[in-house]
Amino acid sequence: MELDRLQIALRRRTPWEAIDLGFVIARRWFGPLWRLWFVGALPVGLALFLLGGPESWWVGLGLWWCKPLYEPPLLFWMSRAVFADQTPLREVLRQWPRLVAPQLLANLTWRRFSPVRSFSMPVALLEGLSGRARRERLRLLGRNQHAATWLTFVGMHLETVLELGFFVGVYAMIPEELRWVDLDELFSAPGRIGEWLQLIGGLLCMSVIAPFYVAAGFALYLHRRGELEGWDIEIRFRRTARRLAGGEGRRAGAVLALLAAAGLSLGTLAPSPALADTADTVADAGQARLLIREVLEDDAFGRREEVGYWRYTGERERSDGEEDAHWLWRLIKGVLEYIGGFFKGYAAIGKLLMWALAVLLITYAAYRILSNRGWFGQGPGRGQRGRGRGRGRPAQLFGLELAPESLPDDPAAEARRLAQAGDARGALSLLYRAALSQLMHHNRVEIPDSATEGECLRLVEGRRGGAETAYFRELTGQWLRLAYAHRLPERERLLGLCERWREVFGHVPG
């Protein structure tokens, strides 16, 4: 390992500072790291999605479970980049099977739940250890190291938050008239488009977190190895040696002479005439001592500092007079502690009551909002429910006439006649107008004149029963496809809507 080529500054750090260093590495080389992860994960995600069919909830689980397939190439590339050797991505992809295959079964089974996965991955991949040697190595490196666990915990939650934010952001940018599902149904029953969104969102969010997760674990590994093996000291030794070799060759020769003199001194136990020849070497020993002192004063060898602290040595012996005064102090101290504990207990009870009151207030406010959610945006007079019932019923909504006198006596029969005559648009428009009129004028669903189709559907879902809600949801979906996507409903489905209209609403009186 050529430590002189290391591209990061080695110094004493806390584990949290080492994680920060990993984040800096990930930001520095985010582009190639992101591409490496995505190139490995995209084929796996597509394969899982195509094999999943309609029950694709396990596609996300499989994509998450197979992370040990995508992360080793990132670590391999970084392990060379930090030593100024940026391997081409094509070469890394060519070596992908060799990087992933060793210990793959263990990585996908019992090791998959390891909270220190990012920290232990370099031991297997870079050092090539397995079995007992790997366990002993991890035991040594992981002694008193807990930051890797927190890294996994926080990274997992950040990934979840990013994915939820992606779904909510995409859903918020879709026009309300084109939303095929509600936000909660985007997770429970998303449909084919929602399943594609889940796959894309999962891939994007995992690909953003993965470079930071792998780089932070690698930085923790480098920090721990440097701490145990003294990499920072070795690097400073080498720099000092180069500095001395460049301009102070004479002093370096003096150090060598001192070492030679120390070796020759072993022969002083036996008389020898050669001792007279070492006078010049001994003369240089003083200079060597000065050089050694200069080297030892360098910061690479640490520094000496005095630290003061308090240490309990026990109570000293007291005289009789001091004992008499001491019992009074103990009495006062006991009374104060009792009073403090008394008020502390009441403070805890008060805090608990305040939290309970806050929860009750929030619950009550939520209940009032939900129970009166149809009251907002209706204009003045909305609270007078006992009088002026017709005041909040618009005669038109998004260009559709809703007055009862504008509708035929039997909307279902008229819509069926139009459908059989080939006028699908007229039939569906009549069914939708009649349903809205029936809900507003006879079923007491109050709809503001500014409401959209989606808002009408939500108001009906909040005020009416299951049969009416289910029918109106299907009718609204067909109407939106016709009005905005210009997609005519199938003839059988349209005739079925005509029959069900009569079952749900009956006849609309004029």
Image (cartoon, helix red, strand yellow):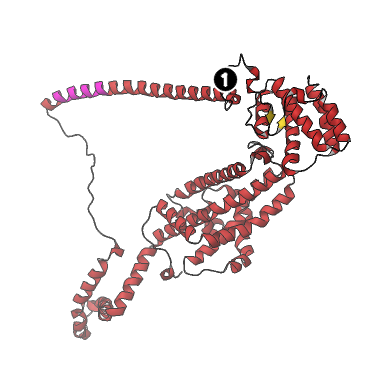
Residue in view at x 67 percent, y 30 percent: 456
Q: Is residue 481 left or right of residue 335?
A: right
Q: Position of residue 226 (x, y in %)?
A: 41, 61
Up-down relation of residue 83 to residue 16 (above or below): below
Q: Examine the structure image and report whether residue 332 is included in the region drawn in magenta.
A: yes
Residue in view at x 81 percent, y 24 percent: 503
Image quarter where the C terminus lies is top right
Magenta span: 324-336
Q: Which amino acid, mark 1?
A: Gly
Q: Position of residue 94 (x, y in %)?
A: 63, 67
Per the picture, the main secondary structure of the magenta-coloured stretch is helix
Q: Could you tell me if residue 317 is visible in this image?
A: yes
Q: Residue furthest top?
A: 386
Up-down relation of residue 361 to residue 186 (above or below): above
Q: Nearer the viewer, residue 297 or 492?
A: 492
Q: Which residue is mark 1?
A: 381
Residue in view at x 57 percent, y 26 percent: 376
Q: Is residue 349 left or right of residue 478?
A: left
Q: Position of residue 375 (x, y in %)?
A: 59, 24
Residue in view at x 54 percent, y 43 percent: 161
Task: Indicate the secondary structure of the residue bearing disc 1.
Answer: loop
Q: Is residue 20 left or right of residue 210?
A: left
